[in-house]
Image (spheres, coloured by chain):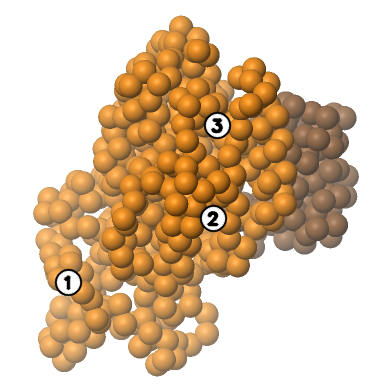
Chain colours: A orange, B brown
Amino acid sequence: MENLTQEKIDKGLEVFENFKDSKLLTHLNSCVHCGLCAESCIYYLTDHNEKYIPAKKVDLVASIYRRYKTFIGKIAPKLVGARELNNETVEEMIDLLFGACAMCGRCVSHCSIGVDISYLVSTGRKMLSNMGYVPESLQATVNAAIETGNNMGISDQDFVDTLTWLEDDLRFEVNDDNAKIYLNEKGKDILYTLNPREPKFFPLSISAMAKIFHVAKESWTLSTKMYDVTNYAYYSGNNEEAAIISQRLYDEIFNLNAKTCVLAECGHGSRAFRWEGPNYIQKEYPFDVTTSVEFIGKYIREGKIIVDPEKIQQKVTLHDPCNLARSGGVIDEQRYILEKSVKNFIEMSPTKADNLCCGGGGGQLAMSEYNDRRMKIAELKAEQIRKTGAEIVVTPCHNCADQLIQINAAFKLNVQIKTIAEIVADAIVMP
Amino acid sequence: MATIEIENKEFKVDGDGFLINPDIWNEDVAKLFAKSDGIEEMNEKHWAIVNIIRQNYEEKGMAPMIRTICQETGLRLREIYELFPLGPARGACRVAGLPKPDGCV
């Protein structure tokens, strides 16, 4: 690493200035070092090295704050454990805040006083982003989204051709030549979004959702211009780039005059647009934003689609995406759907808001730099799955799904990985 | 950057095990990478998928859409997932010597 310039240091320290409320100051000054967070962290549970304890990660950020922003930290830094923002500190920050945190928030719910540890990790990432130290592979994913409109650089032509191909399949599947995958239609009730991974490599979930919309007689459309539900700038800590991505989806909802934006099965994407988005773009949304999981639950409840659990006899378990369940509050809906759609649903342990991260969160799946560590912590999830004896693991998140595919292969679990839409489409009774 | 060794041959790869230099790829490399993913013997279908991915990469600099792979090889989607259990990206693209695609793969 080249020597830090004063300019870079100043850029990094900007995160401690100009905040709009007291949240950052409160959380930076609140940790009582009780250590309860340690056993909640998948990194610490895997490797009992104290550097992985969430409170240590908090202190890494807080110690820099103390050094530059408190009186005693400025005159007697050693007394209050204040740290210089120098090469050594930056290297440690990169390794621990990017490389050893899935921002899963499990420590936050175990914290004795409610410190938002993920938020402080995110603040640390923002410092690194300001200084230009986002890991290359993560930044490449953000760049692809900013430059091409989607994080995999799919061309419009490839996207449209894929949907046309899937539409043929849909017509065959539902036995209706008028079935459609609507594209760029104005005035529909719903603008649906996708994870670019779906059109590029895993389109079964697009077919499944199209089938569900078709049976529910939904008024819906996709957009060529902005369909990407992901926002990797949420992980890189660059709020300006996160705002560009959120604003594009906001604009397209207006452009197509849709009433509701339905976010695809994507944990961080649903969080980034639904909950962080209004802060990124500094605007309230004048339209509804919801997730496809909640919409599918509604269809079943209202009888718009009918599912037959007899169609799925295999043992099914559920992995909760951290950003959707623990942080987003969507916990009961996926369970309601599975109880209606499959014969034999079994919970993993721990579960719901206390479920373990798959290890792919926090941008880990995009960062090749920390692959070994990611697959090592994945053993916890592999064991959770193995203990259920399940043959199918359902997860409403494409990022988790990819990590689970790797876990399945690496730990020889011999399970199938499916999204909620895929399992519901299998269970649906054609009217 | 990391190095992996398969059957006494060393390859420079990224953290995810994708070749750092896609130009050194050849059929022997494909066989070795497939083997390290548990695919003991590459059959005709494996080769059809790998070849179309490779061809697309050499022409356009990126992995093809899954639609292209299905249409060019005549294979069904589910067959592709069965042939490469790690999926088209981490499975097939890695065996075809491509860099890791961006995004949630």
Crowding at dot 1, Cα within 10 Å, few <14 / some 14-19 / many 20+, comes out as few
Disc 3: which residue: A210
Q: Are marks 3 and 1 in contact (CB under 8 Å)?
A: no
At label 2, the amino acid type is: Met
Secondary structure beneath disc 1? Answer: loop
Say which label, 3 or 1, has the lower sequence index.
1
Q: Are marks 1 and 2 in contact (CB under 8 Å)?
A: no
Residue A226 — which label? Answer: 2
Q: Is residue A352 left or right of residue B69?
A: left
Q: CA distance from mark 3 to mark 1?
A: 43 Å
Q: Is residue A11 left or right of residue A158?
A: left
- Residue at figure coordinates x 28%, y 71% from the top left: A61
Crowding at dot 2, Cα within 10 Å, few <14 / some 14-19 / many 20+, comes out as many
For residue A406, above or below residue B11:
above
**Which mark is in front, 1 or 2?**
2
- Residue at figure coordinates x 13%, y 88% from the top left: A71
The quarter of the picture where the N terminus of chain B appears is bottom right
Q: Position of residue A234 (x, y in %)?
A: 41, 61
At label 3, the amino acid type is: Ala
Disc 1: which residue: A21
Q: Position of residue A107 (x, y in %)?
A: 25, 49
Q: Is residue A257 left or right of residue A84?
A: right
Secondary structure beneath disc 2? Answer: loop
Q: Residue furthest front?
A: A187
- Residue at figure coordinates x 21%, y 74% from the top left: A20
